Image (cartoon, grey):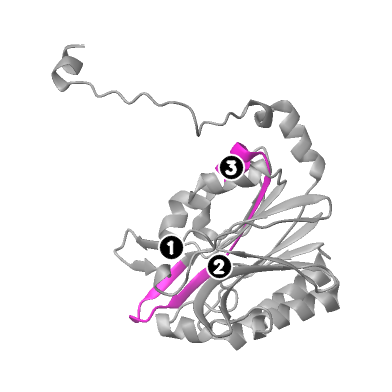
Amino acid sequence: MKISLIQMNSQPDRAANLAQALRLMRHACAVAKPDLLVLPEHFDWTGGTPEDKRQAADLVPGGEAYEMVQAFAREAGVAVHAGSLLERRPDDPTIFNTTIVFDAKGREVGCYRKIHLFDITAPDGKLYAESAVVAPGDGLLVYEIGGFRIGCAICYDLRFSRLFDRLASLEVDLVILPAAFTEQTGQDHWEVLCRARAIEFQCFFAACGQCGSYRAPDGGDRAMFGHSMLVDPWGRIIARAGQDIGVVDVEIDRATVDQVRRMIPMAEHRRDLSHMPVACVSVDRGRQAMG
């Protein structure tokens, strides 16, 4: 299966973001003729105040970003894993960070709403509070295309291995993770976590990121890490972008998954630890020192 990862630099400007996504998707289809296109997290809108984001949230289905990607999938005859967008519903104040998947006829395959929300203080002291606007999802999505079972995750989900353990139990061959990783955390954690997820769950791992920077409400710039990549089930990076806008084209073979799983049959060896007894022992400091 041929996959094209679309690395963008989205801003708080929907028209410009959609034009950028459309240009890059057209380029990918003209050059690589992929079976599946992947967009990054927040391809439709990045940055702005919490109120800006609430106003930017759009309908699923029926919103401008939704309809643009759906029409492109149908007209180009290509499946699209549409990164994530800010989703609202009629007569409901709840907003989600949502992936929508379309097949090559433009039909909606399904939605995944980000489960783990990014509420952290970065090393430079900048606060990120996704939950101030977005509500967490409460379901998973696995879909099939080109002989691959594909599992969905978004950005901060990357740090929570139990999500991927559950996807592995559903026998996924490929996980797709749209992201807008911060430059600071990405420098130390992006590659190692992407490779770890591929190795420990023996699947291809496609991580499609935002790059460049956007202007925060406080006037400062917030840098995103880029470096979209595709990792094979052995943990090897087989395609990677840099820090600029562009497209990563790669072809993957389902047989690689089978080969790795035959060599190290983790699925057969994995144990259910949830009901095992736990011995918690406290050692007196004095006795510990004597020992």
- Please report the bounds of the magenta region as a residue range: 195-223
Tally the marks: 3
Q: Earlier in the sequence, mark 2 or mark 1?
A: 1
Q: Which is nearer the eye, 261 or 18?
A: 261
Quadrant into which the N terminus falls: bottom right
Q: Nearer the viewer, residue 211 or 201?
A: 201
Magenta stretch contains residue 113: no
Quarter of the image with the C terminus in it: top left
Q: Amino acid at mark 2?
A: Gln
**What is the crowding at mark 2: few (fewer than 14 residues within 10 Å), some, or many (at least 20)?**
many
Q: Which mark is residue 165?
A: 3
Badge nearest the viewer, 2 or 3: 3
Tell me if residue 30 comes above or below residue 195 in the rendering: below
Residue drawn at the location 66% of the way across and 39% of the way down? 202
Please tell me the numbered disc located at residue 210. 2
Tell me where residue 221 sits by quadrant: bottom left
Q: Is residue 82 above or below residue 23?
A: above
Image coordinates of residue 129 in percent, x first then y, are: 38, 68
Q: Is residue 103 left or right of residue 151?
A: right
- Report x, y in % for residue 231: 65, 47
Residue 192 visible in the current orientation: no
